[in-house]
Amino acid sequence: MRKRRRHLPHYEQPGRVYFITFTLKPGIVADLSAAQVAPIIIGALRYFAGTRYHLYDYTVMPDHVHCIVQPIVSDGDCEPLDRIMHSLKSWTANEINRALGRTGALWLAESYDHMLRGEDDYKEKARYIFNNPVAVGLVNDPAKWPWWGNGVHCNGED
């Protein structure tokens, strides 16, 4: 078990599944759910699915992203979650800035991560991800939200 602490405590254990939320920095004017932005984030999430981590449920919201991932274990260890998140956030920030004609920091430095504690915890977080666009009034039917997906063990394909 690894433990890191910034503002939030972060616990990691090889083979565990995590619910992660990463958010725009306060004051950033950008809609992550815009048609020219959301595919960048989804593409980045899916790019390393099956090589660095297993990708389960995800959704892109206007100012944040939720995903459930499981870093892939090799020889009893796995890539640290903070390194996975750093590369994901760095690449998406560069591409989103390019798409929006802006520069500078995009994401909050720290992401929220929660180590899932079993099937019930996973199901609760998956439902939360699926229903989040309804909860904030973006759509009436969660299946109509275009920026949700379930990439169970995908390698770039659902």
Image (cartoon, rainbow, N blue to C red):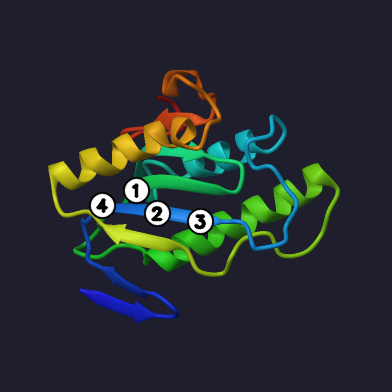
Q: Amino acid at mark 3?
A: Phe
Mark 3 vs mark 4: in front: 3
User: Is there a contact, CB below 8 Å, between mark 1 and mark 4?
Assistant: yes
Q: Residues within 10 Å of mark 4 (few under 14, many from 20)?
A: many
Disc 3 to disc 4, C-alpha distance: 16 Å
First of labels 3, 4 by sequence position: 4
**Percent from the top left, x then y, of residue 54?**
33, 43
Label whose residue precedes the other's in the sequence (2 or 1): 2
Q: What number is the disc on residue 22?
A: 3
**Secondary structure at numbered mark 3:** strand
Q: Residue at horizontal 77%, vertical 64%? A: 104
Q: CA distance from mark 2 to mark 3?
A: 7 Å
- Closer to us: mark 3 or mark 1? 3
Alpha carbon of mark 4 to alpha carbon of mark 2: how far? 10 Å
Horizontal side of residue 78 vs 49, given as left or right: left
Amino acid at the residue labelled 2:
Ile
Whole-percent x and y of residue 143?
43, 19
C-alpha separation, residue under disc 2 versus residue under disc 1:
8 Å
Mark 2 in CB contact with mark 3 (< 8 angstroms): yes
- The amino acid beneath tag 4 is Val
Q: CA distance from mark 1 to mark 4?
A: 6 Å
Residue in the foreground of this view, choosing between 79 and 60 = 60
Specify which label sits upstream in the sequence, 3 or 1: 3
Quadrant showing the N terminus: bottom left
**Mark 3 to mark 1: distance in Å?**
13 Å
Disc marking residue 77: none
Which residue was labeled with disc 1? Answer: 69
